[in-house]
Image (tube, rainbow, N blue to C red):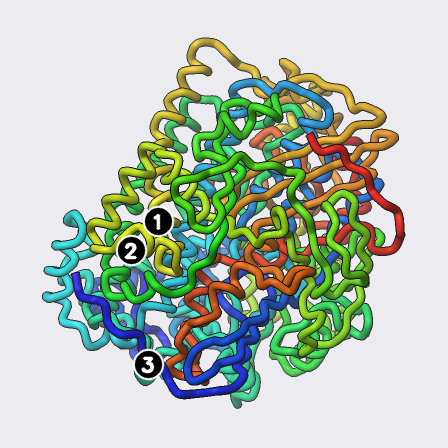
Amino acid sequence: MAESKPTPQSTFTGPVIVDPITRIEGHLRIMVEVENGKIKDAWSSSQLFRGLEIILKGRDPRDAQHFTQRACGVCTYVHALASTRCVDNAVKVNIPANARMMRNLVMAAQYLHDHIVHFYHLHALDWVDVTNALKADPQKAAKLAANIAPARPGNSAESLKAVQDRLKAFVETGQLGIFTNAYFLGGHAAYYLPPEVDLIATAHYLEALHLQVKAARGMAVFGGKNPHTQFTIVGGCTNYDAMTPDRIAEFTALWKETKQFVDEVYIPDLLAVAGFYKDWGGIGGTTNFMSFGEFPTNVQDTAKYMESCYFPAGVMMNRDLKKVDKVDLKAITEHVKYSWYKGDQPHHPYEGVTDPQYTKLDDKERYSWMKAPRYNGKAMEVGPLARVLIAYAKGHKETKGLVDTVLKKLGIPATALFSTLGRTAARGIETAIIAEKMDGWIKEYAANIKKGDSNLAAKWEMPAEAEGVGLVDAPRGALSHWIKIKDKKIDNFQLVVPSTWNLGPRCAAGAVSPVEEALIGTPIADPKRPVEILRTVHAFDPCIACGVHVIEPNSNEVLKFRIR
Amino acid sequence: MKFSVGLGRENAEQRLENRGVTRRDFMKFCASVAAAMGMGPAFAPKVAQALTATKRPSVVWLHNAECTGCSEAILRTVKPFIDELILDTISLDYHETIMAAAGEAAEEALHKAVAAPDGFFLVVEGGIPMIENGAWGKVSGKTMLETTKELAPKAKGVICMGTCSCFGGVQKAKPNPSQAVSVKEATGVTTINIAGCPPNPINFVGAVVHVLTKGIPELDKDGRPNMFFGETVHDNCPRLKHFDASEFAPSFDSEEAKKGYCLYELGCKGPVTYNNCPKVLFNQTTWPVQAGHPCIGCSEPDFWDSMSPFYQQ
């Protein structure tokens, strides 16, 4: 592996604004102050307000999942699942084993799809210079590919040459399409892959465009369609068709092909690219981490839910890999002092009063449609890095094994995980772990059906009054939906969303959010083409549409939720 | 079969042949695209012509009040695959979800595309928030309202991808906090509405090819192409035989549900929803009713209010 290079840095001092941040979901504006080539301060500003929670009020609780799923079409399904778990919890229904397993399998498929698309189509162009691939020697690239990955037809010199020819023909048209004005065009000091690695990565960018169709198809086989699954209901699932041997075989084949891509393409590419960007193991870190846990075996009992998850739940403060605390949902507050809402007092999400009040674009006192969630007053990073760190610290066998292998291959210490590089590596690591684990989960599901369990949905009655919570640790991190039912209708519905944790603004105390903290200290080589900002922001895989939500904007009603 | 030759140059067919793709193969591929559009094989040459034009038509894709599910849907296209679409067929000059450039460089790409002498086609994903003169939704510091109003009249054609841009979408559901409206309502420009939440990508690709080859397709009163939205979901539903025989599933846990009976009594909106889901399937494999879930009517205007509660007739 190549040695770490010093990170290039300009002597620029002044403001830099990136709006739109592209290759994300939603509308995000990042503003930074650069001092002598390094980011000194940062503001993360969400630019769209839709108000899904206001819309949900008064509706049938069973419908919530369809509305909330439209929070985001990239992290599709996760809101449908959170809402369904939430209403299941409120109406106290015990869902059948097949339904739990089917939901978990669709979630696992979503993880694979989401992370592959993120790495190749949302993140890769921050590290890979597509035009530099034109300079590559395909023979040399094929040799390099053979060193880092198992032999595959797509990695042959002929295949790589064909990709190069195709790219050349494309560039020669003069119509660069999605590559128009890319930061890497004409060379950029912050891109340091050799042309051969750029060529391999570009070939796999294209290959992944095809593979992701199949990964999503896997999700659809059980989920009815992708994006926006339509198979969950309060009390279970509807997809009896997905219990037939043919459908299970179809799902299995698509999983296998996706897993093969993860093992033979994604992970080797991640290691190859990371090997040249080891300096990013010291850039973009944050301090505190939280996971709600995912892939539960006990979905009935709120108290036991987190304990039953395959990926463990927990809270890690101050990067302390020796100490993971239990999650206390009562410790969550949401702050609006720096957001486009009236007021400045932090509240528990369910006692909050919120009233939209847009000020102006470049206001630094009120600058985002997102609120700022905090845990015991502290900003928490959620998502792949949080999950992997918490699992690693808790001695989760598969995570510990793969993290140690990756650290060893890259020749970096565990402390380098607290970084942009660590965040991107963690996403790949958990993808590989889930892909491996799915084998057993599919078999367990098939065996349960085979032994004669044909149940997929349970009976239940809508109570006149109830409340419930649904937790999900989505690909982007800790997600919770909260419902209060009155007269069999939604009296109040709340979403506390991963991107709000990661990409919100400052809190009442003026302390920065995880993405703002991560950006501070980042070197900027070219203030006109600040790719370094994209690297760290993209590492969080922002989903801004999810992150903007509001409670009771037009009333002063104080909402009282009992937290279990 | 893949065609990837950088088609935006001369002698595309020659170059296809050099790569071992015969004219016959290529025409077969074009015929399959024509079939997806509901056209006969006689239409294949037109498709071939569109796919081998010397200059790829410029497409600008705006993201307004949306969830990006429609962009994700288009990534799932297989006829052609997305790389073939954006590298060989069209020039996707602005698309925030997949474009390399960001910030000012992205803004500049947009300006360049819309000022190009050959013009551009506009695709819009998302509704338009009108509240406070559009201030609740901004990109590059400009309101979505302002940008869409500026570009829609200049475009050679406007395609609305998904129910949000077609009709206002989920954010328009009561009480419509951001005062969201459709592109047509916001701009006054007539749009080709590919409805659905999200739409099937095959309907988008079919509309694009139609626009490039034959111009604007025949539209229904809601601006949707008749070739995709001319029949109800119910008309083509494989469970129709159960409806006709009055075989209904009374609950999701019932034996009738397990047997695949009609979902009408569980709230299925197939009879009043115009879309081709049962004919074209999602992800080439299934669709919600096949997965045992009632249709929620997602390609109909204001379905969030008019079709809900979803689990009641």
User: Left or right: A321 with respect to A159?
Assistant: right
Q: Residue at x 25, y 55 (%)?
A: A412
Instruction: Report helix, strand or loop for mark 2.
Output: helix
Instruction: Report helix, strand or loop for mark 1.
Output: helix
Chain that bears disc 2: A
Does residue A24 appear in the picture of this structure? yes
Q: Which mark is residue B73?
A: none
- Whichever of labels 1 and 2 marks the residue nearer the N terminus, that label is 2
- Are the residues under badges 1 and 2 in a single subunit? yes
- Whichever of labels 2 and 3 marks the residue nearer the N terminus, that label is 3
Name the residue carrying label 1: A428
Q: Amino acid at mark 1?
A: Gly
Of residues A509 and B117, the one drawn nearer to the viewer in this rendering: A509
Q: Residue at x 14, y 67 (%)?
A: A138
The vertical placement of A35 against B44, above or below, is below
Instruction: Report helix, strand or loop for mark 3.
Output: loop
Chain that bears disc 1: A
Q: Which mark is residue A270?
A: 2
Name the residue carrying label 3: A188
Q: Amino acid at mark 3?
A: His
User: Left or right: B152 with respect to B30?
Assistant: right
- State yes or no: discs 1 and 2 in contact (Cβ < 8 Å): yes
